[in-house]
Image (cartoon, grey):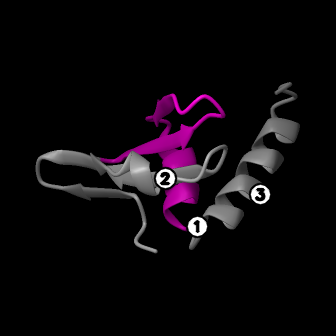
Amino acid sequence: MDYPVSVNENGLNLKPEKMEKEKLYHCIFQNKAFLIFKDSQDVLNCYEIEQEDLVEQIRKCDNDNELEKLFEGYIKGQNLKN
């Protein structure tokens, strides 16, 4: 299956019909990371991250599983609750 999130010079391209519910997708555009997921009610959620060091860590993730592990560690390290 094609990855449902991509970017070009005009911005983000989303294919929500190809997204699995409750799965986190990501892309980088203009030095910002975008996290996208479709919730259990088919509502799209998008978060923009500008923090340079975190964007660079996201850039290094090869797949969505690595991305989820990155955020699990980040949440624990920042003492955040989900």
In depth, the one of 72 and 78 nearer the eye is 72
Label number found at residue 78 = none
| Three-letter residue code for mark 2 | His
Q: Residue at x 84, y 40 (%)?
A: 77
**Image spot of residue 5 (x, y percent):** 38, 55
Mark pair 3, 1: CA separation: 10 Å
Residue in view at x 64 percent, y 50 percent: 23
Asked whether, in this view, residue 8 is left or right of residue 27, the answer is left
Asked whether the beta carbons under mark 3 and mark 1 sit within 8 Å of each other, the answer is: no
Q: Decide: is 42 above or below 69.
A: above
43 in the magenta segment: yes
- Tell me where the magenta segment starts and ends, as one range: 31-60
Placement of the C terminus among the 4 image quadrants: top right
Among the two numbered marks 3 and 1 on one chain, the one whose residue lies closer to the N terminus: 1
Marks 2/3: CA–CA distance: 13 Å
In the rendered view, would you say 60 is above or below 10?
below
Q: Residue 1 at x, y = what percent?
A: 46, 74
Q: Nearer the viewer, residue 71 or 51?
A: 71
User: What is the x, y in percent for residue 60?
Assistant: 54, 68
**Circle 2: element type:** strand
x, y percent for residue 28: 38, 53
Q: Which residue is mark 1?
A: 61
Crowding at dot 2, Cα within 10 Å, few <14 / some 14-19 / many 20+, comes out as many
Q: Pick out the residue farthest to the left.
A: 10
- Crowd class of label 1 (few under 14; some 14 to 19; many from 20; radius 10 Å): some
Numbered disc 1: secondary structure: loop
Q: Amino acid at mark 3?
A: Lys
- Indicate left or right for 81 with 62 as reference: right
Say which residue label 3 marks. Answer: 69
Whether pointer 2 and pointer 1 mark residues with C-beta atoms closer than 8 Å, the reply is yes
Q: Which residue is mark 2?
A: 26
